[in-house]
Image (spheres, rainbow, N blue to C red):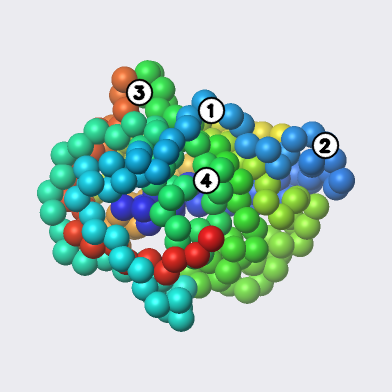
Amino acid sequence: MFKLFFKLILVLVIAAILTAGYLGFVPGLSTIMGADKPKDLGITYTQDDFQNMTTKSGITRQALPESTDLIQSAQYEGTHELKITYSGQDLTALVNETKWKYNPFSNVQIRINQDGTTEISGNINLEKLWDYVGTNGVSTSDIEQAKKALAAIPSQPAFYAKGVTEGADNKVSKLNIESLSIGRLSVPSNIIHTNQHYLAEIADKEMSSIPGFYAKSVKAENGEVKFEGSIPDVESIVIGE
């Protein structure tokens, strides 16, 4: 389950940082302009929130050996049905407290609004990002080109995304990204609307690739996310900071 949320956020962030690199990011001004400080969405959590979410989900969490390679660093076993409601506080705790070694995200906040939109903000560690995408089919030449384009961006830039996402029968049934930014640079709406179908395609692929996971229905409304389907019994990851 963590893997799915991680991948959805990752695709959003990659779209933003590549656009930032393409349009040009002003060197030396990022910190002054607050480009490395995430937007405060007013979401806080405690360790108890993370434990309560783990209990509600019925997932057993285990640690893998530190020597486990990146591709095998998140593994899943078994499956059980689940019908549950998550708050933004729950999801924020999940992303921040699942201490996967290769997680490039930090200071993440997720807010579910009354109108059904979802907002996500945080920082992303570009060094960890390059390590991750390098093992997921992205060519070395593409990575080097992206690194060159993003050379002026701080190593842990802030990101922000807002939109509506719904799922049915283990596929994305609705996707509308309203805004997307990296630092203080907003991605133009025409670029978002032209390319957001790629996010839906990747999300569909990721949902079907997680053993034991099936999203029968996922919808955000009234400040919460309602999930019905099945999730793995056991999540095993390589622990890190």
Instruction: Pinpoint residue 235: horizontal percent, then vertical percent.
Output: 29, 62
Pointer 4: residues within 10 angstroms few (<14), some, or many (20+)? many
Whole-percent x and y of residue 48?
A: 35, 41
Tell me the mark number nearer the camera, choosing from 4 and 2. 2
Which residue, given by chain and number where applicable, does mark 1 sit on? 41
Q: Which residue is mark 3?
A: 223
Q: Which residue is mark 2?
A: 32
> Hey, what amino acid is under mark 3?
Gly
Amino acid beneath label 1: Leu
Label at residue 66? none
Q: Amino acid at mark 2?
A: Ile
Residue at screen point 31% across, 66% down: 62
Considering depth in this image, is 37 or 151 the residue closer to the camera? 37
Q: Are marks 1 and 3 in contact (CB under 8 Å)?
A: no
Q: Earlier in the sequence, mark 1 or mark 4?
A: 4
Alpha carbons under labels 2 and 1: distance apart: 21 Å
Q: CA distance from mark 2 to mark 3?
A: 33 Å
Sooner in the amino-acid sequence: mark 4 or mark 3: 4
Q: Secondary structure at mark 4?
A: helix
| Picture coordinates of residue 183, whole percent (x, y) | 69, 39
Mark 2 neighbour density, 10 Å: few (under 14) some (14–19) many (20 or more): few
Dot 1 crowding, Cα within 10 Å, few <14, some 14–19, many 20+ = some
Please state if 100 lies on the left or on the right of 214 as rendered: right
